[in-house]
Image (tube, helix red, strand yellow):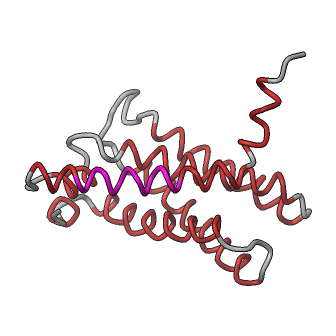
């Protein structure tokens, strides 16, 4: 593992990493810990600010150009920015189920799915983790990152209540 790709990256990428890493950790803590406490409310506001800042920063990053200067990853940024409004509204009106679904969806899309895209070859995070490492070290790093992303995804799925809705989809009528 080397920090050289990040240190040599444009400032927009450095800012993005500086906001997304604490958002990933804080989001996991918020999903795992008790809800509704004063600490949850304060940390939730910080998390949402980090997520919106992270999302805005992606519009200054143009590594994967699919449509003009943008890529499908930018759609996740729009989802997080736009989704933050109903998440806040739901919390304020005490519609916890809707709030939980919005926030878990933003975490799943903005952290887990986008996190997977950062590991593709020639991206900064992929280069940080895999470049210059031996085959064993790269494999171990890939396994650790995979476990963390699966665990984070599992937390988001659980908190969104998506598994509770699954049996209804497969129920015979």
- Front in this rendered view, residue 70 or 168: 168
Q: Is residue 67 left or right of residue 7?
A: right
Quarter holding residue 84 = bottom right
Q: Quadrant of the C terminus?
A: top right
Q: Residue at x 49, y 63 (%)?
A: 24
Q: Quadrant of the N terminus?
A: bottom left
x and y percentages locating residue 130 in the rendered image: 18, 52
- Front in this rendered view, residue 161 or 54: 161
Please tell me whether residue 144 is drawn above or below residue 162 in the rendered image: below
Q: Residue at x 61, y 74 (%)?
A: 46
Magenta stretch: includes residue 18: no
x and y percentages locating residue 100 in the rendered image: 75, 56
- Front in this rendered view, residue 29 or 56: 29
Q: Which residues are magenta?
A: 140-152
Q: Residue at x 43, y 57 (%)?
A: 148
Quarter holding residue 15 = bottom left
Q: How many marks?
A: 0
x and y percentages locating residue 68 in the rendered image: 38, 29
Magenta stretch: includes residue 148: yes
Please tell me whether residue 3 is drawn above or below residue 66 in the rendered image: below
């Amino acid at each position: 593992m080397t920090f050289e790709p990040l240190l040599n990256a444009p400032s927009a990428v450095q800012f993005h990493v500086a906001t997304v890493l604490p958002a990933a950790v804080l989001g996991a803590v918020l999903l795992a810990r008790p809800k509704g406490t004063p600490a949850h409310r304060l940390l939730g506001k910080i998390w949402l600010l980090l997520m919106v800042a992270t999302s805005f920063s992606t519009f200054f990053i143009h590594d994967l150009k699919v449509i003009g200067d943008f890529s499908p990853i930018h759609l996740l940024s729009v989802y997080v920015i736009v989704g933050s409004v109903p998440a806040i509204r739901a919390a304020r009106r005490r519609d916890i189920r809707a709030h939980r679904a919005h926030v878990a969806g933003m975490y799943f899309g903005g952290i887990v799915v986008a996190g997977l895209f950062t590991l593709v070859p020639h991206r900064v995070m992929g280069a940080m983790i895999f470049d210059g490492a031996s085959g064993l070290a790269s494999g171990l790093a890939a396994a650790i990152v995979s476990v963390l992303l699966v665990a984070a995804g599992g937390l988001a799925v659980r908190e969104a209540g998506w598994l509770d809705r699954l049996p209804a989809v497969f129920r015979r009528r």
